[in-house]
């Protein structure tokens, strides 16, 4: 039995949840996957999967075996790619963990250029709001918003975002334009949860070395992945939104959203960070992709330069119902 191939088939089947998904991913037939997994189970003397009409579920032995074999298989695959790529053009798939808003607004406009430059490199974008996501072994690199903490990875700050406090012209006409951050307590402010589930009802402002902290409230709360909903509601005149500047650039440029308090900055705006394992840089396709990402962020307008990730704010990386209920550290 080809043990390396059987392990690759096993890992793919576990991650996809079915033999058919593994077959599509590896571009082989379903019987080939099933036969190899069956041979592996017979050789080990244990069942690795529970099979049902709903798909595959790992047994306890399968979960243990999966965790044990992922790292060595990945290491062998990377070594093979390094050897194959030593004298050939880079090819293969780069799996990128990235949340929807960053993929849509930051990366997508540049993907045609990447494809034109490296036509034999494919890109597989997967939803990942944190570098600590459990499927990390299947991801080559991350582009994240925030302050990643994994010590076994390299973290490169690509740039710093800013926030904009915005509403529609009709809303400001009806409710008045705030002259100071404290005025926002009298407005309907639509809120977004952080990646860890905390409702960000505390908005921070900074000017002249002085920080203002405002606890706001409103009728709508959205998860981080649905921030486009609060933008849409703000355009419809339903309230005030604090949104990343680049994620509402079109609305601000068109005048459907009008920013206020523009002489204030936002100390808790998240950096944009590229993260990867040190060994990934030795894989040609991953190295070329990460270099391309750093290139496009250097030329990207609307982002300030960031030389390091920097310290995270007091609310980041914790789990609480609301930021206003969390102790300051």
Image: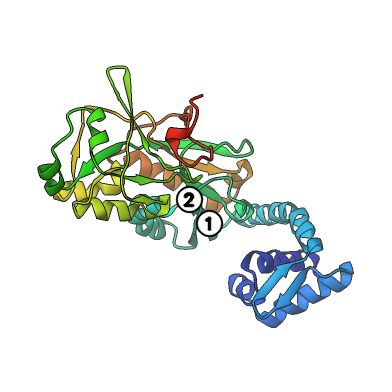
Q: x, y (%) of residue 311?
A: 48, 27
Secondary structure found at label 2: helix
Name the foreground residue: 198 vs 269. Answer: 198
Q: Is residue 131 left or right of residue 33?
A: left
Q: Residue at x 44, y 62 (%)?
A: 119
Q: Which residue corresponds to mark 2?
A: 289
Residue 94's mark? Answer: 1
Residue 179's mark? Answer: none
Q: Quadrant of residue 246?
A: top left
Do residues under tags 1 and 2 come within 8 Å of each other at their CB atoms? yes
Among the two numbered marks 1 and 2 on one chain, the one whose residue lies closer to the N terminus? 1
Q: x, y (%) of residue 307?
A: 43, 29
Q: x, y (%) of residue 201?
A: 37, 38
For the image, the number of numbered tags is 2
Q: Vertically, is 74 above or below 37?
A: above
Q: Residue at x 77, y 73 (%)?
A: 37
Q: Vertically, is 215 above or below 116?
A: above
Residue 86 seen by the camera: no
Q: Quadrant of the N terminus?
A: bottom right
Q: Residue at x 46, y 34 (%)?
A: 325
Secondary structure found at label 1: strand
Q: Quadrant of residue 46?
A: bottom right
The crowd level at tag 1 (other Cα within 10 Å; few <14, some 14-19, many 20+) is many
- Report the colour scheme: rainbow
Q: Vertically, is 304 above or below 256?
A: above
Q: x, y (%) of residue 127?
A: 49, 56
The crowd level at tag 2 (other Cα within 10 Å; few <14, some 14-19, many 20+) is many
């Amino acid at each position: 039995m080809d043990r390396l191939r059987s392990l690759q088939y096993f890992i793919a089947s576990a991650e996809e949840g079915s033999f058919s998904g593994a077959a599509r991913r590896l571009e082989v037939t379903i019987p080939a996957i099933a036969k190899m997994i069956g041979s592996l189970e017979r050789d080990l003397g244990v069942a690795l999967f529970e099979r049902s009409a709903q798909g595959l579920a790992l047994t306890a032995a399968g979960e243990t075996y999966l965790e044990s074999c992922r790292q060595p298989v990945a290491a062998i695959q990377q070594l093979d790619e390094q050897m194959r790529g030593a004298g050939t053009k880079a090819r293969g798939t780069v799996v990128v963990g990235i949340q929807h808003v960053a993929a849509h607004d930051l990366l997508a406009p540049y993907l045609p250029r990447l494809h034109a430059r490296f036509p034999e490199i494919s890109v597989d974008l997967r939803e990942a709001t944190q570098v600590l996501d459990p499927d990390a072994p299947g991801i080559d690199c991350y582009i994240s918003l925030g302050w990643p903490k994994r010590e076994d990875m390299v973290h490169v700050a690509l740039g710093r975002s800013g926030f904009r406090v915005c509403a529609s012209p009709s809303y400001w006409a009806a409710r008045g334009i705030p002259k100071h951050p404290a005025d926002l307590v009298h407005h309907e402010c639509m809120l977004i949860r952080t990646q860890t589930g905390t409702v960000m009802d505390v908005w921070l402002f900074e000017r002249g070395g002085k920080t203002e902290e405002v606890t706001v409230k409103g009728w709508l709360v959205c998860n981080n992945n649905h921030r486009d909903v609060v933008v849409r509601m703000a355009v419809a005149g339903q309230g005030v939104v604090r949104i990343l500047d680049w994620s509402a650039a079109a609305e601000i440029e068109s005048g459907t959203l009008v920013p206020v308090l523009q002489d204030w900055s936002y100390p808790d705006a998240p950096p944009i960070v590229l993260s990867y394992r040190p060994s990934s840089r030795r894989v040609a396709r991953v190295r070329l992709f990460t270099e391309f990402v750093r290139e496009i962020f250097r030329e990207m307008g609307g982002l300030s330069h960031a030389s390091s990730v920097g310290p995270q704010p007091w609310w980041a990386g914790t789990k609480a119902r609301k930021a206003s209920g969390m102790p300051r550290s």
